Image (spheres, rainbow, N blue to C red):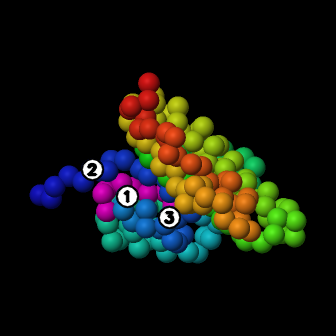
């Protein structure tokens, strides 16, 4: 009989999981035995990611295509997971995007979309799941940010501003936050 993996019986929700850091974080959680909910906008890619990780790591993996940049998308996602009976033990806020260009000539809606996805969605999902994690007295939240949070980057003011600086204290494990 194999050794029990640290995440067995728990589920991690990973946003922005269709590629890059989000995909690699989902893989790390799956290797530790966590079941997964992978979320991003690209449905076809997510279905493949979920199937690959489920097979590779012997976990359950659910793919949900969702544009978290839309207002109330986090609440819609949480309601769908509740309807499916999927409880979240770890929330990984990874979904984000950036764009470069002079502030006055880059598209205003794209800049506001960056604020919505990089900040509002993180706050919305954390607000939804934090009290649930505290009630269980276990679990956690991982907020992924860019090093741009620590420095000015020419032509990327909005992107850098939407990346939180956790060096002054970040989110703690639910069990540690009373």
Taking depth in this image into account, of 162 and 84 the one nearest to the observer is 162
The secondary structure type at the circle numbered 1 is helix
Is residue 112 depicted above or below 44 in this figure?
Answer: above
Mark positioned earlier in the residue sequence (3 or 1): 3
Other residues around mark 1 within 10 Å, as few (<14) / some (14–19) / many (≥20)? many
Is residue 77 depicted above or below 19 in this figure?
Answer: above
Mark positioned earlier in the residue sequence (3 or 2): 2
According to the picture, the residue beneath numbered tag 3 turns out to be 22
Q: Residue at x 52, y 50 (%)?
A: 143
> Gap in Å between the C-alphas at discs 3 and 2?
20 Å
According to the picture, the residue beneath numbered tag 1 turns out to be 29
Residue 33 in the figure: left or right of residue 128: left
Q: Residue at x 41, y 38 (%)?
A: 173
Mark positioned earlier in the residue sequence (2 or 1): 2
Taking depth in this image into account, of 81 and 126 the one nearest to the observer is 126
Q: Residue at x 85, y 62 (%)?
A: 108
Q: Residue at x 57, y 42 (%)?
A: 126
Residue 125 in the figure: left or right of residue 11: right
The residue most toward the top is: 178
Other residues around mark 2 within 10 Å, as few (<14) / some (14–19) / many (≥20)? few
Q: Is residue 68 something that shows in the picture?
A: no
Q: Quadrant of the C terminus?
A: top left
Q: Which residues are magenta?
A: 31-38
Q: Position of residue 83 (x, y in %)?
A: 57, 45
Q: Quadrant of the N terminus?
A: bottom left
Q: Position of residue 177 (x, y in %)?
A: 44, 29
């Amino acid at each position: 009989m194999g050794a029990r993996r640290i995440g067995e019986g728990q589920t991690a929700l990973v946003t922005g999981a269709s590629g890059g850091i989000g995909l690699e974080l989902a893989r790390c959680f799956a290797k530790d035995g966590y079941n997964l909910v992978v979320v991003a906008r690209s449905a076809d890619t997510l279905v493949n990611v979920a199937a690959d990780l489920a097979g590779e790591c012997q976990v359950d993996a659910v793919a949900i295509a969702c544009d978290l940049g839309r207002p109330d998308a986090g609440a819609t996602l949480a309601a769908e997971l509740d309807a499916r009976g999927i409880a979240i033990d770890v929330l990984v806020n990874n979904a984000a995007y950036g764009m470069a260009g002079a502030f006055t000539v880059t598209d205003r809606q794209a800049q506001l979309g960056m604020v919505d996805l990089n900040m509002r969605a993180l706050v919305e999902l954390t607000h939804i799941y934090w009290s649930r994690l505290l009630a269980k007295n276990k679990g956690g939240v991982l907020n992924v940010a860019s090093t741009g949070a620590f420095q000015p980057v020419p032509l990327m003011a909005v992107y850098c501003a939407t990346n939180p600086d956790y060096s002054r204290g970040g989110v703690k494990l639910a069990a540690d936050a009373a």
